[in-house]
Image: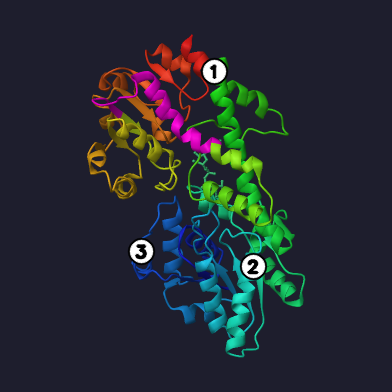
Amino acid sequence: MKITIIGTGYVGLVTGACLAELGNNVFCLDVDQKKIDILNSGGIPIHEPGLADVVTRNRAAGRLTFSTDVAASVAHGDIQFIAVGTPPDEDGSADLQYVLAAARNIGRHMDGFKVVVDKSTVPVGTADKVRAAILEELQAREAGVTFSVVSNPEFLKEGAAVEDFMRPDRIVIGCDDTPEGQQAHALMKKLYAPFNRNHERTFWMDVRSAEFTKYAANAMLATRISFMNELANLADKVGADIEAVRHGIGSDPRIGYSFLYAGCGYGGSCFPKDVQALERTARDYGQDLLILRAVEEVNHHQKHVLGQKIVERFGENLTGRHFAVWGLAFKPNTDDMREASSRVLLRQLLERGASVAVHDPVAMAEARRVLALDFADASHMLERIRFSDSPMDALRGADALAIVTEWKAFRSPDFDQVKSLLKAPVIFDGRNLFEPDVIGAAGFEYHGIGRSVLTKS
Ligand code: UDX
């Protein structure tokens, strides 16, 4: 099938490459000439496991094209995926200017039936706005062509996006109950048929419910994390082990094990933004989403917990102290630093006068860029960040190690080496990577999240 993807960001690029891998002929459009040049010269602008292979293979096979040519992109695809960014406005609502600009371009150039798919995460009701924008353009040039707007949210996790796309646990598609909607339904069914061979994974619904589903899923996951984080803080006080509690409750199939890991807060491009956008939508309709407000507040607090533990241990004034920080990306297998907890910890430490040595297996270049912006007005703080080439190098002469991202490479270090490089054997573990009794026996003073019962004994 002939497919157009508008926006070669994270979602667009993964969707385009994977749809090409299924044998479709995919045209990817972006306004950013630099990005298109990188893609056309065989590069990949983001770090995502497996993506480079899929892109290279399908470009070579002639099934994947990258271009800035808007008219050609509209002419190409019977299905037009809108996968552009929806950054949060100042008030937390999703900024739809890029989505609507893409819609207007489609309306301006289309000369036959098109299915227009909202792939970007967009607030409930956006499909109506996309429809109106296309209609306006069609009317302006008195074009009598038809189209249908479909909602098909993505559920890709960064670091596992190709795998998630190729083996989805569900495909959510919202179509209108109109003749055009039925035409769209038929085309979408054909497109996703390869995923439904063994058993049906598609959930068909109305457009608004599909839009809502995406937010509901992310809000639920964020809620689970904040719930566990809040309980972990209490566990620290009452002397319980949150990991034991996680096992104890996760074994109930109604609860399940996943997304119950306490830590130093969630980050990334989705949870923070989507929780805020759903709250904003609710407010627009006169409802206050009390739970989500709390989820956000808890997460904000949680990003400070590791720093607070360090302050409790070393005092408010950290001048002259030096800390090693392992992990900068908001989670493993990505170089994404958006809303990363590491940024909050670094600020806490640097503001109190400490210096730091940081290491991340892939996010070093991105960290240099992001931290330069974070501390643009405070070069004296930026100067106190040393970017280390290896985790062990970061430890040299540090008063303690703080772990912020749960990279596999950090899970089983040579503890003797760690001890010999640190000034004192103290670890603040924001992701509960280690077993407190084991690490205690190895001679470390260990501060996890919600595990102090074991550390104290
Ligand atoms: C998320 C959703 O999982 C995905 O379905 C959606 O499409 C986009 O948003 P992503 O942002 O890539 O994906 O990351 P995810 O793996 O969900 O992790 C988000 C954050 O939560 C990370 O900072 C992670 O460290 C944190 N997390 C996750 C926890 O703190 N505890 C957990 O138990 C799980």
As drawn, the label of residue 127 is 2
Respond yes or no on whether mark 3 lies under 8 Å from ligand 1.
no
Please say whether residue 165 is one of the residues in the magenta stretch: no
| Type of amino acid under label 2 | Ala
Marks 2 and 1, how far apart at CA: 48 Å
Magenta segment, which residues? 298-323
Residue 323 in picture, x, y percent from top left: 30, 28
As drawn, the label of residue 237 is 1
Please say whether residue 321 is one of the residues in the magenta stretch: yes
| Type of amino acid under label 1 | Lys
Residue 132 in picture, x, y percent from top left: 63, 75
Residue 212 in picture, x, y percent from top left: 67, 55
Q: Nearer the viewer, mark 1 or mark 3?
A: 1
For the N terminus, which image quadrant?
A: bottom right
Give the image quarter of residue 125. Answer: bottom right
Give the image quarter of residue 208. Answer: bottom right
Pointer 3 residue: 42
Tell me if residue 202 comes above or below residue 399 in the rendering.
below
Q: Nearer the viewer, mark 2 or mark 1?
A: 1
Q: Dot 3, crowdedness within 10 Å: few (<14), some or many (≥20)?
A: some
Q: Nearer the viewer, residue 13 or 191?
A: 13
| Type of amino acid under label 3 | Gly
Q: Residue at x 28, y 48 (%)?
A: 376
Return the residue found at the far top: 457
Marks 2 and 3, how far apart at CA: 34 Å
